[in-house]
Image: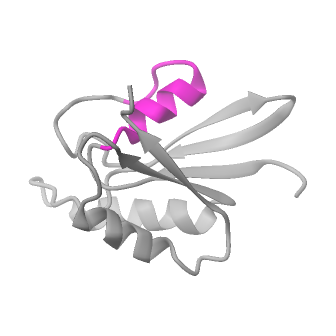
Amino acid sequence: MSGQVSVAIVGRPNVGKSSLFNWLARRRLAIVDDYAGVTRDRMTTLIEVNDRHFELIDTGGMGIVDEDNLTDDVQRQIEFAIHSADVILFVVDVQTGQMPLDDEVAERLRGLGRPVLLVANKAD
């Protein structure tokens, strides 16, 4: 694989996608809050690891029902990120354990034809 690689961070609401995005970016770019649905749009940044450049993409929570009627827009942004990514980081929350929405996210990611890495978050 040559050139810049695109990595999308996806998962259900409140699993720590934006916290992971900020940690990988090594700076606070995405808003992080305990309230579900704060991230509504895709956020991207370029990161460098071992002299390789990556486009890192933060997304809203899959399956969120947005109280401001932006659910369809959030889902479109997630779909765009998933289909444009070379690699997908599927984030789950180990404190709450496996939830039905995690299963729905996993099902959406099956058969994409690109690597999906499971990231167990909130293990500290």
Residue furthest to the left: 67
Q: Residue at x 14, y 60 (%)?
A: 69
Vertical position of residue 6 compared to residue 115: above or below: above
User: In front here: 65 or 96?
Assistant: 96
User: In front here: 55 or 95?
Assistant: 95
Left or right of residue 21: residue 52? right
- Looking at the picture, the colour scheme in use is one colour
Relative image position of residue 15 (x, y in whole percent): 32, 44
Q: Quadrant of residue 67?
A: bottom left
Vertical position of residue 35 compared to residue 76: above or below: above
Which residues are the magenta region?
A: 15-30
Residue furthest to the top: 27
Q: Quadrant of residue 16?
A: top left
Left or right of residue 48: residue 118? left
User: In front here: 53 or 68?
Assistant: 53
Q: Residue at x 88, y 58 (%)?
A: 1
Tally of numbered tags: 0
Q: Residue at x 50, y 46 (%)?
A: 119
Relative image position of residue 96 (x, y in whole percent): 23, 45
Relative image position of residue 115 (x, y in whole percent): 66, 64
